[in-house]
Image: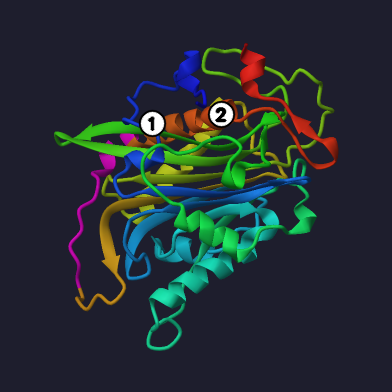
Amino acid sequence: MNRRARDFGLICGSLPPGPLNAITDVAGVRVGHRSLREGNILTGFTAVLPHEGDLFREKLRAGCDVINGFGKSAGLVQLAELGQIETPILLGNTFSVGTGFDALVGRALAANPEIGRETGTVNPLVLECNDGFLSDIRARALTEADAVAALDAAAGGPVAEGAVGAGSGMSAFGFKGGIGTASRLMRLDGRDFTLGVLVLANFGNAGDLVLPDGRRPVPPVPTPAAPERGSVIIVLATDLPLESRQLNRVARRCGAGLARLGAFWGHGSGDIAVAFSTAGRIAHHETADLLPMTMLNESRIDGPFRAAAEATQEAVLNAMLAAPAVTGRDGNSRPSLVDALG
């Protein structure tokens, strides 16, 4: 069984976690992985499905924050403009964005014959990090079938972390990185609400990592100084009723969790957070002119701000602690953070 931050006494912040301490603590959210591990290939797709229905027909309010934009993602422009998501979210490597795009378009077309005919097109959401240090990214090994397999594998419950799915070949702070998740609970108006985060951690220079207890572990084999060229993708889900502008603001606070770990968002780093709320769906074929909406009182938004920072910080640590030491392309290797902590 994978070890997580709390197994090492590493507590990020003060808010309580959800039952699974995972993005799937938000009801309806599912996660699936497809991993490729053969020879010089260590890569994969990870899929996040925000609800159990057809996202094109029942969209969700969403927001995003581009912390540093050295990335090749698809779908962010329309998301930022309309404040909605209408497909599952796929995470992969840099050269798989087009592949994931095609897979999401294919699924949407199959489920909705009116797309491109009686109604508009669809906006697939695909985000990436570069796993080229450990995996032969030039091989372009990921296929549409792999993306579909990740989507089909999506389930609720505990989330596999570490070197799985899109995280198979990722690195963080000179250690093995990958997929990690965490959640936080908030109480508002006498009701419990959940905010969950899933990260694809592939960022941070060796020696910069700062743990919640103040320790600064370094990889056992010194890594030559180099510019920060990693990336991190953060997917944030909540059942709190937030409108898109508020979701933009909450997504921005994920950067505070990265900073607590020692990240400074270098020039060559693609650091992007996408946030969505499951509280209320937007019908694609809505006919009413005016729609009712419940939203968070803006003066109470510090709660989800804190939750986003804490869950992001812990999700990255969970990704690193769940990942074993890995040797990949051309003998390149990354040690496990677990071994550095003893």
Q: Amino acid at mark 2?
A: Ala
Q: Amino acid at mark 1?
A: Asn
Q: Is residue 119 magenta?
A: no
Badge 1: residue crowd in 10 Å (few <14, some 14–19, many ≥20): many
Vertical side of 25 occupied by 92: above or below: below
- Residue 228 horizontal/vertical position (percent): 73, 37
- Residue 246 horizontal/vertical position (percent): 35, 49
Vertical side of 284 occupied by 134: above or below: above
Q: Quadrant of residue 87?
A: bottom left
Magenta-tinted stretch: 290-303
Q: Main secondary structure of the magenta part?
A: loop
List the residue tagged with mark 2.
322
Secondary structure beneath dot 2 equals: helix
Q: Residue furthest bottom?
A: 117
Say which residue appears at 58% left-offset and 46% top-offset. Answer: 165
Say which residue appears at 68% left-offset and 55% top-offset. Answer: 94
List the residue tagged with mark 1.
21
